[in-house]
Image: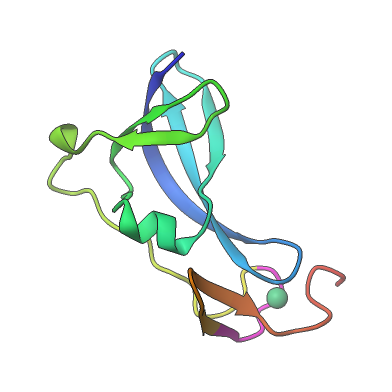
Amino acid sequence: MAEKALIEDIVFAVVEGGALVPYAEVMKENGTAGYVRIANLTTLLKNDIRIGDYVQLDGLMKITNTLKHLRQIDAHLPWIPVDCPCCGHEMLIEHSRTLVIRCVNDGCLKE
Ligand SMILES: [Zn+2]
């Protein structure tokens, strides 16, 4: 069942392997808040998902559609962190099939 939700914020977390992954902090129409993992930065940028946007979620809390016709003038992209949000180490941009920003600290997530 599809549900409409408002993206209140987009935050970043580091996952196994050091890759930076965006999460949308959403408020559903029924008043339930939650986090939705966005696959990667390419998905975020290609689908132009912004803070303040209304999106459609499927039953698995996955964004299936951005409701661009409901976009407000103050909808904006998140700041993409330069330093690792987990350990503070600098991160490197990898240009592969998808855009990946990765923490290069081997000890990250273990600290
Ligand atoms: Zn790190």
Decide whether residue 91 is among the magenta residues: yes
Q: Give the image quadrant in which the ligand numbered 1 is located.
A: bottom right
Q: Position of residue 30 (x, y in %)?
A: 44, 13
Residue pushed farthest right?
110
Q: Nearer the viewer, residue 90 or 65?
A: 65
Q: Position of residue 17 (x, y in %)?
A: 74, 70
Q: Position of residue 26 (x, y in %)?
A: 45, 34
Q: On the rendered structure, is 16 left or right of 10?
A: right
Q: On the rendered structure, is 2 left or right of 90?
A: left
Write the start and end of the magenta stretch as one range: 86-92
The image quadrant where one finds the C terminus is: bottom right
Q: Nearer the viewer, residue 88 or 5?
A: 5
Among the 4 quarters of the image, the one containing residue 44: bottom left
- The residue positioned 60% from the left and 86% from the top of the image is 90
- The residue positioned 46% from the left and 63% from the top of the image is 41
- The residue positioned 62% from the left and 69% from the top of the image is 85
Q: Nearer the viewer, residue 48 or 35?
A: 48
Q: Position of residue 42 (x, y in %)?
A: 42, 62
Among the 4 quarters of the image, the one containing residue 31: top left
Q: Is residue 35 above or below residue 108?
A: above
